[in-house]
Image (cartoon, rainbow, N blue to C red):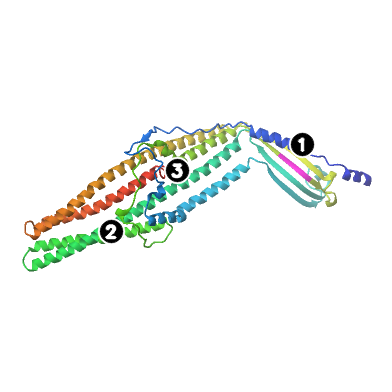
Amino acid sequence: MLQHRHNLNNQKLPDMRPRMLMILAAATLMGSTGCLVGGKYSQPTLPNMPAQYAQPASADTSALLSWFNLYGDTVLQRYIRTALDSNRNLLAAANRIEESREIAGLVRANLYPAFGYQLQAGGGQAGTDARRIGAGVDGGALRALGTLNWEIDLWGRIRNNNQAAYTRLLADVDNRNALVVSLVAEMAAQYFLLRDLDNRLAVARRTLTVRQESARIIGERFSKGYVAEVDKLQADQQAGLAAAAIPAFERQIILVQNAMRTLMGLPPGPLERGDALFAQTVTPDIPAGLPSQLLQRRPDVREAERRLEAQFYNIGIARANLYPQFSLTGVLGFASPQLSSLVGGSGFVANGFAGLVGPIFQFGQNKRRIKVEEYRTKQLAYNYEQTVLRAMADVDNALAQYRTFNDEYNVRTELTKAARKSLELTRAKYDYGYSSYYEVLIQENYLFDAELAESVTFQQRLNALVQLYKALGGGWQ
């Protein structure tokens, strides 16, 4: 008996490695050449895409600035960088990218075998009949096993799932890029509005100073009987109108400042100013023939297509569920009732199993799942087309706004010059008694309104260029 046990302990263990390697190689070949039942995704045709957008200038876009360098104001550039570093929505979007990256890694790991181990020690007592039905162990039980589990992706279910996860990662990246574009545009628009309000506040204060001096002079003339009381009252009213505009502009300035600081992740407070409104520099003229393919660089358009592509792979996942799933499981190690005999020929364990599981009758559940995914894909296809159509309208609107606001600003500049000259002449006529003070009031209001409108139009002209860059996905380089 002792000799027999000695022979067992010294016999050569069966070499399972060649057999296991053959199984793994065959399984890998089966997984790599399996049928991808979902088909291959192809990019949708953009709906009714024009060849180009017309605009009067050169068609060469190579020399134009990237849109971040559009703004010559160094203070604005610093604010934009602060917002890109500290905006909470942007930080959350970056965090979502990392989350999606980890999810994609988790899904991709399903393509490969899963290795594990089992360690078990214990014991018990069981009668003969109990042992016959596996109800217990009579004595000790020691196990040290390595395990293998691998689903062979014959029909592309895992590959489709992996591709969908990766595409969703790319969509999250595009979503963050869209937030970057929107954030830069919003910061620039708010800054230009702030400089416009600063300019309008300065206009109101300057107008108040002039009108207060006029009211003082007319008050002195009234006290000496040179003018009627109505002139004095009208002069006071004019000064009051300018004075009332000042706190209104100050209130709006505080709101805009706080909005900008929120974008930068800062608490409420004042902000430093850079160049004055009319000193803001803009890019050279927009080139003619802006290619419509620029829309494809818009992050929101790319994101919409990524979402569509990810959903397309869900159809493949649903179709793969119609077919059986093939899996390999294996156990390699040692098991023995005693520690002294755990490692040896008598305790060696090597088991391998192939499993095949598939549906037979599920009353149409899997087919309905395919239909559900197909309908969801159609919904996202329509959403993609709507995103492209909206992008086309954004570009066309922005081009029209830039052109028309530029023309309007040129007209308003001339109106302001004419109103200023007309007020000078009307005051001179009034001083010499050739016109009534009512004419002076009219010209003062004309000039005040013209200066405010000129400021607003210049700000809108700047914002139109910002919106154009945003509509083109951040520039045209």
Which secondary structure, mark 2?
helix
* Percent x, y of residue 420: 18, 54
Q: Is residue 1 visible?
A: no
Identified by mark 2, the residue type is Phe
Residue 330 highlighted magenta (yes or no): yes
Q: Which residue shows up at 78% across the image and 52% down it? A: 122
Amino acid type assigned to the residue bearing label 3 in the image:
Pro
Front residue of this view, candidates 131 and 174: 174
- Local crowd size for mark 1, using a 10 Å CA cut-off: few (<14), some (14–19), many (≥20): few
Tell me the distance, in whole angstroms, between the alpha carbons under discs 3 and 2.
Answer: 36 Å
Residue 285 on image: x %, y %:
33, 43
Work out whether 477 lies above or below 220.
above
Kindly identify which residue carries mark 2.
Answer: 249
Disc 3 target residue: 299
Residue 428 picture quarter: bottom left
Task: Please report the bounds of the magenta region as a residue range.
Answer: 329-333
Q: Which residue is mark 1?
A: 19
| Residue 19 coordinates in the image, percent (x, y) | 76, 36
Comparing 66 with 183, the one in front is: 66
- CA separation in Å, label 3 and label 1: 51 Å
Q: Identify the image quadrant of the C terminus.
A: top left
- Quadrant in which residue 242 is drawn: bottom left
Of label 3 and label 2, which has the lower sequence position? 2
> What amino acid type is highlighted by mark number 1?
Arg
